[in-house]
Image: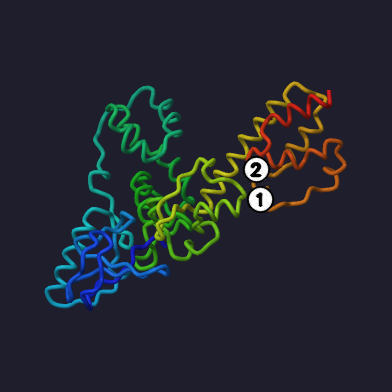
Amino acid sequence: MFRIKFEAQYCKSNQTLCRVCNEIINKNDIRIFIYHMSGNEYYHLNCYRPKVMQYICEKDIRMNLDGDAEQRFKEWLEEWNSKYPPIDKPYHSPPNMLKQVESKPSKYKRAWIEVFRFMSPAEAASKLSFVCKEFYHITWDEELWHFYYTNEFPVPEIEINNWKNSYIAMALKACIGCHKLMEEDNFFRCPLLKKPLCMNCSNTKKFWVFTKSQAKAHYQINPNLLNVQFYLGKWSSASCYNFMIKKAVVEYRQQNKQILLKELENKPQYQDLKEILDSIKLGKLHKNVPPDANLMANPFYPCYEKLVKYLKNKEGGVKWIHGYLKNNN
């Protein structure tokens, strides 16, 4: 999942062309070989640049080199990996993140803590702490980091003395799915969320990876309308996790629902229509769940399908409800 895989080998003839410079790769020179169902790709070692800008794991590479060629390839690999954090090794927090400077707390500390709760931990630690000394002191407050910890991770059974350091350790080393600390050989650092993900959780339905076309087919909506970012995947196609897409779909449908409710506002004669609208479950529209008998008995049931289509992808626009209200006044 989102891993760079290729084979480093000797060129077997003078008949292969580099995909980048379109020049012949000389026999016995190092070449990068990538297998695709549509056709193989070959590159000079100095020409090759992975399409996904991330760390390359040695266990994902097949290397059929020896001697000076092997040393030269390892130097190239080391230079590339020096630019990115490892995805299969534990990442330890820098020492300067675990230091605290003694300073006098602000008299408005209580109010600022409540405000900081609306910020993400990353914003509090990396941005707000640099605003002034008072903010820096508050970003080390145990109550604030206790809130961050319990809001994202399960409450630990053991007593914790330093909530900030504990949160940093969990954020860097704990799986985002099961919230368990990872073993070295049983996780990778997710390129989409920049957090660890264990192999067991990566195979669950929540962490399925959808391309834009798959998301469109599954949720029956144009992904470009959603407030979600798709990332470049291993097959050079934009991809995103299922739970992120599902959350964006529900938010999009909720916005559409609010638009319809606003159109029906201050119109008591359409109370039954509002009840139909409230009964529609936004998270299950793509599953075509049949309505119950009580809903079918509603006098406004004939417009149920139009409401569903609008909530899904604004099909028909708001003008249809204006026409419906006008014809029934």
* Residue in view at x 33 percent, y 47 percent: 165
**Left or right, 54 with reference to 111:** left
Residue 204 at what x, y percent from top left?
A: 53, 62
Q: Regarding mark 1 in the picture, which secondary structure is present there?
A: helix
Characterize the local packing of mark 2: few (<14), some (14-19) or many (20 or more) Cα atoms within 10 angstroms.
many
Q: Is 301 on the left-hand or right-hand side of 151?
A: right
Q: Position of residue 231 (x, y in %)?
A: 42, 50
On screen, residue 236 versus residue 274, left or right, reads left
Whether residue 10 is visible, yes or no, is no
Q: Check if mark 1's residue and mark 2's residue have beta carbons within 8 Å.
A: yes
Please tell me which residue is depicted at 74% across the width and 39% down the height of the picture: 306
Residue 9 appears in which quarter of the rendering?
bottom left
Residue 280 falls in image quadrant: top right
Mark 2, residue position: 312
Residue at the left extreme?
68
Residue 189 circle label: none
Q: Secondary structure at mark 2?
A: helix
Residue under the point 50% across and 57% down: 207
Residue 152 shows in this picture: yes
Q: Quadrant of the N terminus?
A: bottom left
Q: Amino acid at mark 2?
A: Lys
Q: Earlier in the sequence, mark 1 or mark 2?
A: 1
Q: Position of residue 148 (x, y in %)?
A: 43, 42
**Residue under the point 54% across and 56% down:** 206
- Specify the quadrant of the image occupied by residue 146: top left
Depicted 12 relative to depicted 213: above or below: below
Q: Which residue is mark 1?
A: 286
Query: Counting other residues with Cα less than 10 Å from the Cα at mark 1, is it few (<14), some (14-19), or many (20 or more)?
Result: some
Query: Is residue 229 depicted above or below 190 in this figure?
Result: above
What amino acid is found at the position of numbered circle 1 in the picture? His
- Find residue 32 and report its horizontal and vertical position in percent: 26, 68
